[in-house]
Every structure is written in structure tokens, then in C-alpha cells.
Image: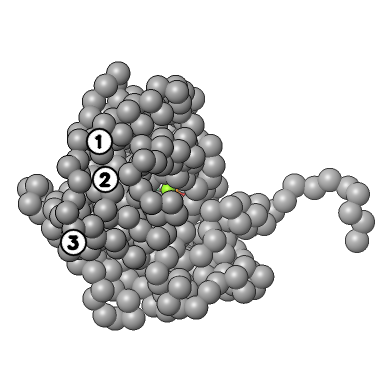
């Protein structure tokens, strides 16, 4: 076959290429589906998986639902209800906005999307088989809200399937994704079932005491006894959450959660500011523990840096660095030395 002529990729192949960036493993599918449920205003989200989501991964929500006529469109690339123009993009509050996740996931799995809006008499469903981008709309039974069922992930992309790890490892990743989102949204109930068994059940937390219970369930029962509560506000930047006492450090950076306007991010500048704040109080090679929520004007942060949106770009990074370092350093300086150092592993 001659390779020197130019041709447009088929929609399916274009989606499979895009899926390479977003859909790495069942946990990345779960992240996208949970974010969609949250964007739809769900207050209860149920997750059911088989074989760590490799065989089947279902996310059911009680959110706003999708108009029947829009269901096929939801699976198309660059189709979104969340932004309309550049101004929307610059102030985006929703977790999603690229209109790529469902198209990508459906191109590498057997996907069924079922949804019912509150004003609709019936639910409708669309199904795709990965190889075929055509979808048919069918009436279905479903309460208000949406379900996305993803079966046989990577069944048509064996090269990707080979990169999946053991069921245990993939399940650990799934739990981590759920944990990261559940820590940011105390107001939403989450549940997780694996191979027919209930693994996690988090009721919604509206009272502070219920919030503390959720943190204990997710970060360990000892967590709240070994952290400092943080509540800082300056120059339009607001920081809340908890940071570990210097005596409560880890050998790995595995208890570190940082949220920017509700979105979990990994950011070098943030990591550096926090590391600096701990520099004098932590042993070399130990990692601090933190669950921190930063809030700032959405226009001052660019979330459209990477398809997974784990990275962000701050307009005024100097200001942010000083705010984080200064605030946390001072909070740590005010701690009286503990008599019984406890070092978690
Ligand atoms: P994005 O989230 O970036 O808009 P997606 O591919 O994840 O792109 O979803 C496409 C569209 O499908 C969304 O914009 C939304 O309108 C709709 N959608 C997806 N999942 C849900 C859901 N659980 N509830 C309601 N609408 C949904
Ligand atoms: Mg989305």
C-alpha cells in the first residue's frame, strides 16, 4: 500500500488514537465516568466492577441525565454540553469540557450508555461495539440519572491490553481514583462493589463530624489525630484541609492530595512549595502527608494543559508559591514538639 498520499483518519481510528492519551487502564475509565457523574450534579454514585473493571465497569448516577436525542452525540468526539465558546473554556468549572472521554472509551470497549432525565417518561440507551461508531437508540429501564457500562476494555486493541497489570494492581488503581474524588466531594455518596461484593460505602457527609468520618475511612482511622487543620486566606487565594504533623511522615509520597477548585492535580510548583515548608522539620527521605483544597478565581488557572487534566497552569505562580510556602511553614512552626514521635510507614 502506498503511504505517501494523505487521507483523513476514520473516526474510529482517530478516537482510538485519542484514547491512548486518556484511557490507560480501568482506573482512567473510572475517573472519566465519575467526573461526568459529578458534572451532572449527582448526589449518589454507584460503581460496580468485575475483574477490576477489565471485564466490566459500571458507573450509575442520579444526576441530570441526557436528552434521548443527545445520547448518540454524547459518544462523539468533541461533543460536549459543558462549554460553548472560548469564554466558557477560560472560566470552566466542570471537571470535563473536552468532549472526548466517552468517544475514546467507546472506541476501545463495548459501551452502553443509558439515561433518563427527570422530565422524561422513559429511559433510553445507546450501545457501541468499539469497531462500529454507528449507534442505535433504544428504550430502556432506568431510574432518573445515567449509567455507563464499559465491558471488555481493550478487546480490540490487544497491544494496550497487554499493558494491564494483575487484577489486584488494577483494583488498587480503581480504589485510588475513587478515594481521590470522594475526598473532594463529601456531599456525594459513593459505593463500590467488586465481583459482587460491597467494598466501600460512603454516605454523604453534610455535618463536619460526618466529613471527619469519611476522611478516617479513606485515610485511616489515625489520620485526624496526626494532622493540623489548615484554613488560610490571602490575596484571593483560599487554602483548607489538613497537613501531617512532622512526626507523621511516610516513606512514600502516597498520602498527598492537592485539589485546585475541586480538581485533583499534581503540580511541581505546589509540590515544591510544600516540600520547602517541611524542609526543616522532616527527616531526609521522608514524605509529608497532606489533603489540601486550594480555591481561586477560575480565570487565574488554566486546566486545559493535558487531556487527563492532572496538570494545571497558574497565572501567578510566584504568588501561589509564596502563599503555600509561607502559610504552611508558619503553621508547622507553631506546632509544639511532640513527645512521642510516631512514624507511619
Ligand atoms: P465532557 O465531559 O468533556 O463533556 P464526555 O465525553 O465525558 O465529554 O461526555 C460527553 C457529554 O455527555 C457530556 O458533555 C455530557 O453532556 C454527557 N454526559 C456524559 N456522562 C454523563 C452523565 N453521567 N450524566 C449526564 N450527562 C453525561
Ligand atoms: Mg467527561
Q: Earlier in the sequence, mark 2 or mark 1?
A: 2
Q: Which of marks 2 and 3 is nearer the N terminus?
A: 3
Q: How is the image coloured?
A: one colour
Q: Earlier in the sequence, mark 3 or mark 1?
A: 3
Local SS, label 3: loop
Image quarter where the C terminus lies is bottom left
Q: Name the residue under label 2.
A: 243
Q: Residue at horizontal 36%, vertical 37%? A: 277
**Up-down relation of residue 81 to residue 197 (above or below):** above
Mark 2 vs mark 1, CA separation in Å: 13 Å
Q: Mark 3 points at which residue?
A: 222
- Where's residue 182, x and y in %? 27, 54
| Image quarter of residue 202 | bottom left
Of residues 132 and 26, the one nearer the viewer is: 26
Q: Is residue 18 visible?
A: yes
Q: Residue at horizontal 45%, vertical 73%? A: 169
Label annotation for residue 333: 1
Local SS, label 2: strand
Amino acid at each position: 500500500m502506498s503511504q505517501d498520499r494523505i487521507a483523513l483518519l476514520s473516526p474510529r481510528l482517530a478516537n482510538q488514537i485519542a484514547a491512548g492519551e486518556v484511557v490507560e487502564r480501568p482506573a482512567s475509565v473510572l475517573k472519566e465516568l465519575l467526573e461526568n457523574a459529578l458534572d451532572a450534579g449527582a448526589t449518589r454514585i454507584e460503581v460496580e466492577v468485575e475483574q477490576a473493571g477489565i471485564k466490566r465497569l459500571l458507573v450509575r448516577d442520579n444526576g441530570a441525565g441526557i436528552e434521548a436525542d443527545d445520547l448518540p452525540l454524547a459518544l462523539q468526539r468533541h461533543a460536549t454540553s459543558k462549554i460553548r465558546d472560548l469564554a466558557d473554556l477560560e472560566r470552566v468549572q466542570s471537571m470535563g469540557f473536552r468532549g472526548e472521554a466517552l468517544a475514546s472509551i467507546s472506541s476501545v470497549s463495548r459501551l452502553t450508555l443509558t439515561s433518563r432525565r427527570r422530565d422524561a417518561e422513559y429511559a433510553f440507551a445507546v450501545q457501541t461495539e468499539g469497531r462500529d461508531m454507528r449507534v442505535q437508540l433504544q428504550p430502556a429501564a432506568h431510574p432518573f440519572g445515567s449509567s455507563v457500562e464499559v465491558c471488555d476494555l481493550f478487546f480490540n486493541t490487544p497491544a494496550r491490553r497487554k499493558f494491564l497489570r494483575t487484577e489486584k494492581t488494577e483494583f488498587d488503581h480503581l480504589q485510588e481514583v475513587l478515594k481521590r474524588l470522594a475526598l473532594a466531594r463529601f456531599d456525594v455518596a459513593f459505593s463500590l462493589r467488586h465481583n459482587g461484593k460491597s467494598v466501600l460505602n460512603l454516605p454523604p457527609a453534610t455535618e463536619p463530624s460526618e466529613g471527619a468520618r469519611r476522611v478516617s475511612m479513606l485515610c485511616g482511622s489515625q489520620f485526624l489525630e496526626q494532622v493540623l487543620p489548615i484554613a488560610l486566606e490571602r490575596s484571593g487565594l483560599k487554602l483548607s484541609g489538613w497537613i501531617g504533623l512532622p512526626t507523621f511522615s511516610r516513606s512514600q509520597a502516597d498520602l498527598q492530595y492537592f485539589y485546585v477548585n475541586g480538581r485533583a492535580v499534581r503540580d511541581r510548583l505546589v509540590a515544591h512549595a510544600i516540600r520547602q515548608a517541611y524542609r526543616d522539620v522532616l527527616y531526609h527521605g521522608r514524605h509529608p502527608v497532606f489533603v489540601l483544597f486550594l480555591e481561586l478565581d477560575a480565570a487565574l488557572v488554566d486546566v486545559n494543559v493535558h487531556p487527563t487534566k492532572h496538570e494545571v497552569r497558574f497565572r501567578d505562580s510566584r504568588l501561589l508559591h509564596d502563599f503555600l510556602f509561607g502559610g504552611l511553614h508558619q503553621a508547622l512552626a507553631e506546632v509544639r514538639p511532640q513527645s512521642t514521635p510516631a512514624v507511619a510507614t
